[in-house]
Image (cartoon, rainbow, N blue to C red):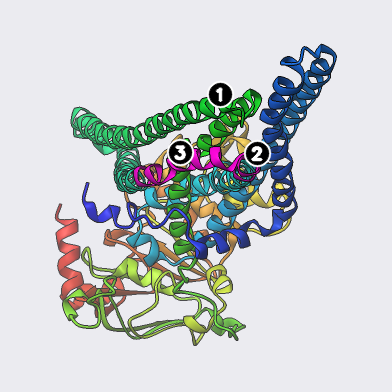
Amino acid sequence: MPDAQDDGEGALGRAFDRRLVARLWDAARAHHRLIYGSLLLFPLIAALELAQPYLLKIAIDEHILRGDWTGLTQVAGLYVLVLVGLYVLRMAEAYLMHLTGQRVMHDVRARLFAHVVRLDARFFDRNPVGRLMTRVLYDAEAVSDAFTSGLSAIVADVVTLAGVVAIMLWMDWHLALVTFSIVPVLAVFAGYFRLRARDAYRTVRRRLARLNGFLQESLQGMAVVQLFAREAHERERFLELNASYRRALFQSTVFEATLYSTVEAIGAIAVALLLWYGGAQIAAGTLTFGALVAFLQYTNRFFLPIRDLGAKYTVMQAAMASAERIFELLDEKPAIVSPAEPVAPRGAAATGLAFDRVSFAYDTQTRLRRDDHMVLRDCSFEVAPGEHVAIVGATGEGKSTCARLLNRSYDVTAGRVLVGGVDVREWDLEHLRRHVGLIFQDTVLFTGSVEANLRLGVDGALDRAALERAVRMANAAAFVDALPGRFDAPLSERGANISHGQRQLLAIARALVYNPAVLVLDEATSSVDPESEALIQDAMKRLLTGRTTITIAHRLATVHGADRILVLHRGRVHEEGTHGELLRHGGLYARLWELQTAR
């Protein structure tokens, strides 16, 4: 898979980015009570955590060494109460943090999806589906981890470390300095492995992006893979990418494990220094045995969060990288939006269409510099209200592009597209797309019931009788009645459990329910059997009645009944007229007709 598809996937920044944390806080502000509740628990948990070693000191120095079993029993009881309280508070802390993380993840995903569906078609042309799925699913989950085991854990560790340092200095600053003397060495090792872990994690993200992209593409194209017997090749490619991802994960794990074991070893050295120095102090009578035991306990609590630094750093690295990508997507402005003051033409004239010297290119980088990238070049034509116009031409001449410009899936490079005498850029976008309906060659049906797909573009109540009427008019009643459950029958992904012709009939029924004033049919009868085509053509006669219609087709036999036929060639209208007029003219249309009928 080309590396170009991975651009940005492996880019990492700092594990703590103040700007991103501020934006994450804005995203989590709605759940501030949960966050504040978690923060209030941190000092309480730290206090109970730090009370345990001191209770050991009291038990040893004041009761065990003096043989005071009554006092020891009281201290032991207090110690048990501290443990119970710590257990309850930690359980509450974990619950609140995970609840916060899940709610933030839910909100971020909802916000991402709501934003993505507003973006223009050109955005989806340049962004693979797999990458967008990674943003909505995996990156949102990584941001959730920042609240459950990243930022919250770091805050808890800071509170605990501050308490440990304060108590150790208060108890015996000499012993505290012995413990802290090892910190510079620890900082050097931690810094080195932190940088190596960051690079390793960058590689993990890049290879995961490749794996996700390949998997999504392979699953979508599985029919083609099987058609050309490429299963073995695809399996080998997947194994290669999966192994590459595994190696990257293993490399990052090596650095995390090395950091963990290094901190553990340095902590053991600190304990040895404490035993050596503390033993001498006990022999000199300047330190009690209980105090040394307590110091050993505090030293363990001092190195514990540092030992887990690798895991916390990885979580924060992932969260910051994911947050960067999420906010980058949220900052992506839709290129096609409704104007501040939209115009809404009314009456019969609102269904008239016109292309006024339209030029267009899909390639935004070269469209203004190279004419050979233009799909349409100075293209002009008109469609009167209620007229049925067909657009024909060779592949790549811009027929489908005309359909996409009419409902502003794309904006023109130059010129104007007019609906009802008003530039489509002056229409309210939702109103325009309800006004101009499209039926594509590749009908998209969604997972769900037949009824849910028929109601796709309808707001408000619509009785079953209206759906049945639309299905009958679309000649789809026979196969819908044959489905188990009829309108409640489930459709699989993209309607794969019904035939292509049946999907087209449902699309026509959906258009009848949607009832647009202007209708564009883009190769709506291609790739179907003759029987299905006859049903579709008959249904279309009802669908086209009383509407301004544009039919786009390769097969000229399907459009000879149109009021007028436009022949596109090199991005312009090369010929126009009725079927008979164009045949008598003997031009490009006549040659295309001859080629198709001679087969």
Q: Residue at x 62, y 42 (%)?
A: 160
Residue 378 image point, x, y percent: 27, 85
Left or right: 296, with 251 as reference point? right
Give the numbered dot on residue 171.
2
Tell me which corner region of the image, top left, top right, bottom left or bottom right, holds residue 262. top left
Q: Mainly helix, strand or loop, the magenta region?
A: helix
Tell me which corner region of the image, top left, top right, bottom left or bottom right, holds residue 460. bottom right
Mark 3 is on which residue type?
A: Ala
Q: Residue at x 33, y 81 (%)?
A: 413
Which tag is nearer the camera, tag 2 or tag 1?
1
- What residue did someone put label 3 on? 311
Left or right: 215, with 418 as reference point? left
Q: Residue at x 47, y 60 (%)?
A: 17
- What residue did someone put label 1 on? 283
Q: Secondary structure at mark 1?
A: helix
Mark 2 is on which residue type?
A: Met
Q: Which residues are magenta?
A: 165-190
User: Toward the viewer: 268 or 304?
Assistant: 268
Mark 3, Cα crowd under 10 Å, few <14 / some 14-19 / many 20+, is some
Distance from Cα at disc 2 to Cα at disc 3: 31 Å
Distance from Cα at disc 2 to Cα at disc 1: 18 Å
